[in-house]
Image (cartoon, rainbow, N blue to C red):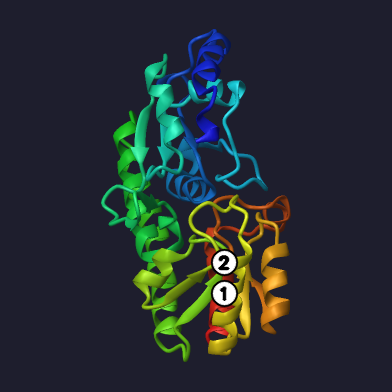
Amino acid sequence: MKRFIGLALVMILALSFVGCKRQSVADTGKTTVYTTIYPLYFMAKQIGGDRVDVTNIIPAGISVHEWEPGTRDMARLYEADLIIYIGLDLDSWILKTQNGDSNAIYCKASENIEPIKEGNTVNPHVWLSPKNALIVAYNIKEALISMDQSDDSAYFEANYNVLKQRLEELDRQYSEALSNAPRKSFVVYHKAFSYIARDYGLEEITVIGLDDEQEPSPAQISRVIDYCKANGIKYIFAEPLVTPKPMQTLANEAGAQVLTLNPLDGLTEEEEKSGDDYISIMRENLENLQKALE
């Protein structure tokens, strides 16, 4: 809830920054697209190609769970023709711009994905399952086609089909590797990987719940240590944008090693510089999952 404190004031100030009218698709020849998390940015770039200008609103190296929009961030969104967001209570602050001077179309990329419910909330990490990524890509493609004013739908369709083939191959790799894994449970910090578990027949064991900013209690850590010892767990997973200290402590006590499983809500600066992308990191995730499930 703390990310919403003062958001009304941010919106009022953001409107004061808007000033001039934003350029339209017709003015620039390209669709101006803003996304809220990296996987949406990646897919919009792949499908939109040179017909779109895509910006991810959250900077590299920052988790979506930690980031709060500032005045200038919100003001930038008024330049958009298309805003792509996940929804599912992850980035719904983006909808606040609908109440201002924005003419953007809003694409909820998780549309038609069956969400996993966690008590009174839903798990938003749908992009970590290749099966869901296929749905997200389709939704983005349809949104871009709806925005296009130069009848380039065939261009978006062609780019989408290339991405679709890559995601289908990724899904096949996950299905084959994980269906044959000797183990079926894996240990992670927070519930970011529930859709992988659901879609590929695994069990996700977590220290904390959905909020990766939550401080784990001694009882939570002790529970997972006991589970690791009882089940002979050799590897547990930390996340790049979350402090590894709790998982390293847990690993030391359980006699396990720490691997990385990337929730991909944002890339680190190092990952950006090295040329990593959604597909390559999802493959790295699969390699580490296979190792942990041996």
Which residue is identified by label 1? 224
Q: Looking at the image, do the residues carrying marks 2 and 1 touch, with CB atoms under 8 Å apart?
A: yes
State the SS at label 2: helix
Residue pictured at 57% horizontal, 53% vertical: 212
Is residue 239 left or right of 166 when viewed as pictured? right
Residue pictured at 50% horizontal, 25% vertical: 77
The kind of residue tagged 2 is Gln
Residue pictured at 46% horizontal, 88% vertical: 181
Instruction: Give neighbour class at mark 1: few <14, some 14-19, many 20+ (Cα, 10 Å).
Output: many
Splitting the image into 4 quarters, where does residue 207 fall? bottom right
Instruction: Give neighbour class at mark 2: few <14, some 14-19, many 20+ (Cα, 10 Å).
Output: few
Q: Position of residue 40 (x, y in %)?
A: 47, 47
Residue 256 visible in the snapshot? no
131 w.r.t. 241: above or below: below
Splitting the image into 4 quarters, where does residue 248 fall? bottom right
Is residue 220 left or right of 25 when viewed as pictured? right
Residue pictured at 40% horizontal, 21% vertical: 26
Specify the quadrant that holds the C terminus: bottom right
Is residue 3 left or right of 117 when viewed as pictured? right
Q: Position of residue 217 (x, y in %)?
A: 61, 60
Q: Position of residue 21 (x, y in %)?
A: 48, 11
Splitting the image into 4 quarters, where does residue 76 fall? top right
Which residue is identified by label 2? 220
236 w.r.t. 233: above or below: above
Is residue 137 left or right of 69 when viewed as pictured? left
